[in-house]
Amino acid sequence: AQSVTQPDIHITVSEGASLELRCNYSYGATPYLFWYVQSPGQGLQLLLKYFSGDTLVQGIKGFEAEFKRSQSSFNLRKPSVHWSDAAEYFCAVGRYGNKLVFGAGTILRVKS
Amino acid sequence: SQTIHQWPATLVQPVGSPLSLECTVEGTSNPNLYWYRQAAGRGLQLLFYSVGIGQISSEVPQNLSASRPQDRQFILSSKKLLLSDSGFYLCAWSGKYEQYFGPGTRLTVT
């Protein structure tokens, strides 16, 4: 069965510190991989995506993610977190023409 | 460029009343369309998806229904709302790969 696990429900980091949000997936084939961000009361915004090729992908707002096939992971990183990054982050996987499978989300809190 | 609209933005309805939420997409044709629900403190639950006009697939049994009367219009309905229908409803569209989400509708059933 296809599934996405985001092990951390909440993460708190200090402003200026680095960030890594974890995502592990279970899928029958190499999926397409996505990270979305949701601010309170708003829709989801696509941060970045991986289809193939270079396993380190760059996204908007200074985020990057690395696909590791051997670990079935697609972790999201940012070198220096800003207070405006506080939000909920969702990892998702899918294939062409198929529905996306979303993780349960990780809530990021940023302390000043 | 493509845009997706949802309305209303917020809605307060009594138990047993009907519901109609609308989603429209601009700037693309023949998109796949999706309805999701987020209950408080929970993740995304896919309710319905559609690959074309009149083609609706339901993911979970419930008292909600969906329709797609036009290529870029997706409607979520209920004849009688339950308290458990409260939540944040998101519409999304996709082309080949990623999904793009609308701003959402906050529904409170009282």
Image (tube, helix red, strand yellow):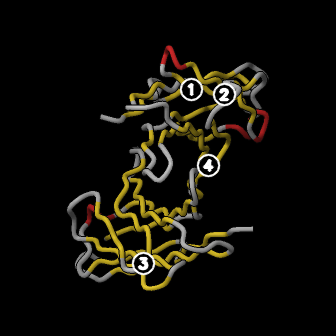
Q: Identify the secondary structure beneath mark 1.
A: strand
Residue A68 in the image: state x and y as whole percent: 57, 19
Tag 3: Cα neighbours inside 10 Å, few (<14), some, or many (≥20)?
Answer: many
Q: Which residue is mark 1?
A: A74
Residue B105 in the image: state x and y as whole percent: 49, 68
Looking at marks 2 and 1 on the same chain, the residue that comes earlier in the sequence is marked by 2
Looking at marks 4 and 2 on the same chain, the residue that comes earlier in the sequence is marked by 4
Q: Which residue is mark 3?
A: B75
Distance in Å between CA atoms under marks 1 and 4: 21 Å
Please say if B47 is above or below A23.
below
Distance in Å between CA atoms under marks 2 and 1: 6 Å
- Give me the residue at 44% from left, 24% from top: A7
Q: Quadrant of residue A108?
A: top right
Q: B59 or A38, which lies in front?
A: B59
Q: Amino acid at mark 3?
A: Ile
Q: A53 or A60, which lies in front?
A: A53
Q: Amino acid at mark 2?
A: Ala
Distance in Å between CA atoms under marks 2 and 3: 35 Å
Which numbered disc, 3 or 4, marks the residue closer to the eye? 3
Residue A51 in the image: state x and y as whole percent: 61, 37
Q: Amino acid at mark 4?
A: Ser
Which numbered disc, 1 or 3, marks the residue closer to the eye? 1
Q: Which residue is mark 4?
A: A39
- Give me the residue at 41% from left, 68% from top: B50
